[in-house]
Image: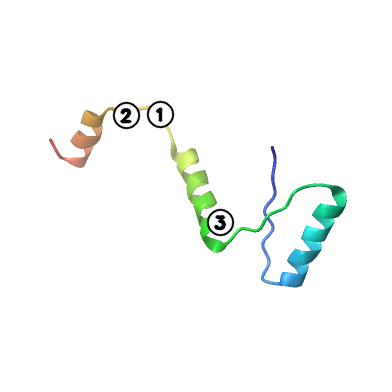
Amino acid sequence: MTGIIITSENKSDLKLFFEMAKRIGVSATTLNDEDLLDIGLLNAMQKGKKTDFVPREKIMKTLGKK
């Protein structure tokens, strides 16, 4: 699946995009500000992910705890 995010403050512009999506047979949905922030956070976390697993001991040592 591939997607596109289009943002606008103008509701009539968004309505036009929804109508175009319906006309060409693709799905479209609305996202609120919280949804957009969640997507951005997930994207940042995925880019920052360097390893699959970090042992608890190493995390505690880094945090300066036993």
Query: Horizontal and vertical percent for residue 52?
Result: 41, 27
Q: Is the residue marked by circle 1 packed among few (<14), some (14-19), or many (20+) residues within 10 Å?
A: few
Horizontally, residue 53 falls left or right of residue 23, namely left
Give the residue displayed 21% in from the left and 29% down from the top. 57
Alpha-carbon span between mark 2 and mark 3: 29 Å
Q: Nearer the viewer, mark 3 or mark 1?
A: 3
Q: Which residue is mark 3?
A: 36
Are the residues tagged 2 and 1 within 8 Å (C-beta)?
A: yes
Up-down relation of residue 57 to residue 11 (above or below): above
**Viewer-closest of 15 and 13:** 15
Q: Which residue is mark 2?
A: 54
Give the residue displayed 69% in from the left and 37% down from the top. 1
Q: Which mark is first along the chain, 1 or 3?
A: 3
Tag 1: amino acid: Thr
Q: Which residue is mark 1?
A: 51
Tag 3: amino acid: Leu
Residue 31 marker: none
**Viewer-closest of 52 and 29:** 29
Query: Horizontal and vertical percent for residue 33?
Result: 55, 62
Query: Horizontal and vertical percent for residue 42?
Result: 49, 45
Query: Horizontal and vertical percent for residue 51?
Result: 40, 29
Up-down relation of residue 11 to residue 3 (above or below): below
Q: Nearer the viewer, mark 2 or mark 3?
A: 3
Q: Is the residue marked by circle 3 packed among few (<14), some (14-19), or many (20+) residues within 10 Å?
A: few
**For the image shown, how many numbered marks are present on the structure?**
3
Q: Quadrant of residue 15?
A: bottom right
What coloring was used for the rendering? rainbow
Alpha-carbon span between mark 3 and mark 1: 26 Å
Horizontally, residue 46 falls left or right of residue 62, namely right
